[in-house]
Image: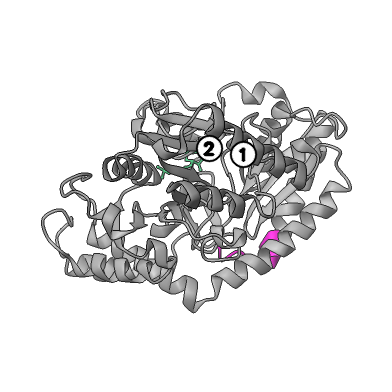
Amino acid sequence: MPGLYARESRSVSKMAHLRFFPQAVVGGSGAYLTADDGRQLLDFSASWGAASLGHSHPAIREAVGRALSDQAGASYLSSANEACVLLAEKLLSLVPERARGRVWFGHSGSDANETVARIVVAATGRPRILAFHGAYHGGTIGSMGVSGHPAQQGSRAEGLTLVPYPNSYAAGSPEAARDAALAHLERLFATEVPPEEVAAFFIEPIQSDGGMLVPPDGFFKAVEALCRRHGILIVSDEVKVGLGRSGRFNAFEHSGIEPDIVVFGKGLGGGLPISAVVGPEAIMNHSVAFSLQTVHGNPVCAAAALAVLQTIERDHLILNADRSGKVLREALDRLTARHTLIGDVRGRGLALGIELVTDPASREPASRQAALTVYRAFQLGLVLYYVGVQSNVLELTPPLTLTPAEAESGVAMLGQALADVAAGRIDEALLGDFAGW
Ligand SMILES: Cc1ncc(COP(=O)(O)O)c(/C=N/[C@@H]2CCCCNC2=O)c1O
């Protein structure tokens, strides 16, 4: 095992470990990480989507340097600061009219979703929350409480009801998936859950950790109509697939809906910790001192986020996500023709998932093969991880700056990894210390 990784095991807790192979990095630039053994690793994960502009982006370096050269404190709890005001004004301009009220800043998608879960109940007086099976809204008690991912080690909130997310691959068609999921919701409101008791419905416009599930056409439009009919707030969790990654600024735009509350995180800070909740004033100003941590609204992280949004606009990174996403998708479709392990390729823009199955007919999850594939890819110089409620969906969330050439290079390495796994050339003992999810 490389030196730095071994040293880490003698000093750093494993509580945050979600490890798939002995990745240890000492630097990075653009879409590449520098491993501690000197290898250049093409990063198809971008640290689970957080490094939205890749690594060491000059716009972020410059913004952070400037913010630190004349630091306006470290928090917005008891002082306004210019960076947060500018960022809030920018985010308000990027959400639908319904959500264009006020902005709350946090550190992570978790604390943002936890805050939303608390404030919607407090502000509406409704005790229930809806969310999807397989949803990952965070790793804190309150955000896990409104999640539905089976890998999470925490309890669900008392007022939470989970419903099926439409899975077109499993159902055999988008239409079958959509109709079954909508019928379930209608039945739920008619028999178990009084809709007038539901404060909010947490949705992922593409369900990422649950398996990069793309909602069928018309599904969220029908959900929106149902929520409007019963006065249920729609919360779009854009933490992983938002900010241009899907090929639209907000991923919910693909479904043609207008959520009431929009949650940003991960890529918002370009690798620095900042999240945001954007919602109606009546909700967002319901209480003061309701959700706060000391360095929330940190002006340095807010400056980084402003630089991210400006760079996404200036460098047309939404268009790049669409174009490089198409190159990536086409290369993966060519790979599908050569590898029976690949059951499905899905996603939008640079949010893609590759479901691995032991048999295309049965669609049996190939979880072990997924673990071996990402390990082999790492050996070949490509970083990607897997998601899915069965841990069998390779997740591709590369930097929004990914070039077509980098896309092709990564897929070539992935193809080699799949071939090596399919041929039984990878020793399963390698997975010993790497439990993944
Ligand atoms: C749609 C969505 N919403 C909220 C979150 C929580 O964000 P944080 O991990 O920044 O608290 C996440 C985080 N997702 C996990 C983070 C843990 C490692 C597994 N992969 C993820 O992307 C998310 O995907």
The CB of the residue at mark 2 lies under 8 Å from ligand 1: yes
The CB of the residue at mark 1 lies under 8 Å from ligand 1: no
Mark 1–mark 2 distance (CA, rounded to whole Å): 8 Å
- Crowd around label 2: few <14 · some 14–19 · many ≥20 (10 Å): many
Q: Which residue is mark 2?
A: 135
Give the quadrant of residue 188: top right
Q: Are marks 1 and 2 in contact (CB under 8 Å)?
A: yes
Residue situated in front as seen by the camera: 325 or 409? 325
Q: Position of residue 247 (x, y in %)?
A: 60, 65
Q: Which residue is mark 1?
A: 165
Q: Is residue 19 visible?
A: no
Judge from the rendering whether residue 247 lies leftward or rightward of residue 50; answer left or right: right
Q: Residue at x 49, y 62 (%)?
A: 243
Of marks 1 and 2, which one's residue comes earlier in the chain?
A: 2
Quadrant assignment for the C terminus: top right
Which residue type carries mark 2?
Answer: Ala
Give the quadrant of residue 143: top left
Position above or below: 310 against 169 = below
- Crowd around label 1: few <14 · some 14–19 · many ≥20 (10 Å): many
Give the magenta range: 400-407
Judge from the rendering whether residue 6 lies leftward or rightward of residue 287; answer left or right: right
Q: Position of residue 258 (x, y in %)?
A: 49, 60
Residue situated in front as seen by the camera: 111 or 116? 116
Which residue type carries mark 1?
Answer: Tyr
Check the image and name the residue furthest to the bottom.
Answer: 314
